[in-house]
Image: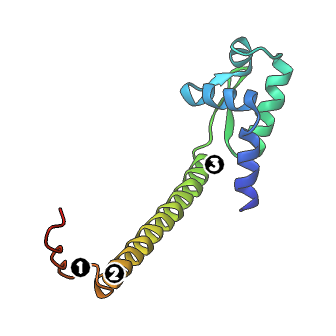
């Protein structure tokens, strides 16, 4: 796994950082706005934002005396691409498994026909019901 992807996933592994990430995804916000909606202090929110920023998931911009945090589209695109590749690999593996099973069943079915499974049944002896 790419170190940059691992860093991003690790950053989102903390529940508070994930909550901050989701809050920012809904609406860019300042630290005090984020802290008001979380059970942690403003300095703790700032530390979490630093981790998210270093992971390339959020960026900040100045608006007067405040820093407004928003998602970093480039970092999000890398995560999206990573998960798209995982999904493609999973679908390809599923397709191969399904095709292999189909081939195996088809081989078993044709083998059973040659072993007499599909021959005409002999008539039952007279008097046997």
Answer few, some or many: residues within 10 Å of disc 2's Cα (few below 14, many 20 plus, some between 14 and 19): few
Q: Quadrant of the N terminus?
A: bottom right
Residue toward you, 44 or 106: 106
The mark that comes first in sequence, 3 or 2, is 3
- State which tag comes first along the sequence, 1 or 3: 3
Q: Which residue is mark 1?
A: 118
Q: Neighbour class for label 1 at 10 Å: few (<14), some, many (≥20)?
A: few
Image coordinates of residue 18 in percent, x first then y, are 69, 32
Q: Which residue appears farthest toward the top when viewing the image?
A: 36
Labels 3 & 2 near each other (Cβ < 8 A): no
The residue under label 3 is 75
Q: CA distance from mark 1 to mark 2?
A: 8 Å
Q: Is residue 23 above or below residue 81?
A: above
Q: Residue furthest front?
A: 127
Asked if residue 55 can be seen in this view, the reply is no
Q: Position of residue 16 (x, y in %)?
A: 75, 27
Question: Dot 3 surroundings within 10 Å: few (below 14), some, or many (20 or more)?
Answer: some
Q: Tell me what residue is drawn at x 47 percent, y 63 percent.
A: 94
Identify the mark at residue 34; answer none if there is no mark: none
| Residue assigned mark 2 | 112
Is 17 located above or below residue 35 in the figure? below
């Amino acid at each position: 796994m790419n170190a940059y992807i691992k860093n991003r996933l690790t950053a989102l592994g903390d529940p508070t950082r994930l909550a901050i990430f989701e809050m920012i995804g809904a609406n860019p916000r300042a630290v005090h706005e984020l802290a008001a909606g979380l059970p942690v202090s403003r300095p703790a929110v700032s530390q979490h934002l630093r981790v998210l920023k270093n992971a390339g998931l959020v960026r900040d911009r100045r608006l007067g005396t405040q820093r407004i945090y928003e998602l970093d589209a480039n970092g999000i695109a890398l995560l999206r691409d990573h998960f798209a590749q995982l999904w493609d690999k999973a679908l390809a593996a599923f397709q191969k498994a399904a095709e292999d099973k189909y081939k195996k069943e088809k081989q078993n079915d044709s083998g059973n026909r040659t072993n007499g499974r599909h021959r005409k049944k002999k008539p039952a002896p007279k008097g046997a019901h």
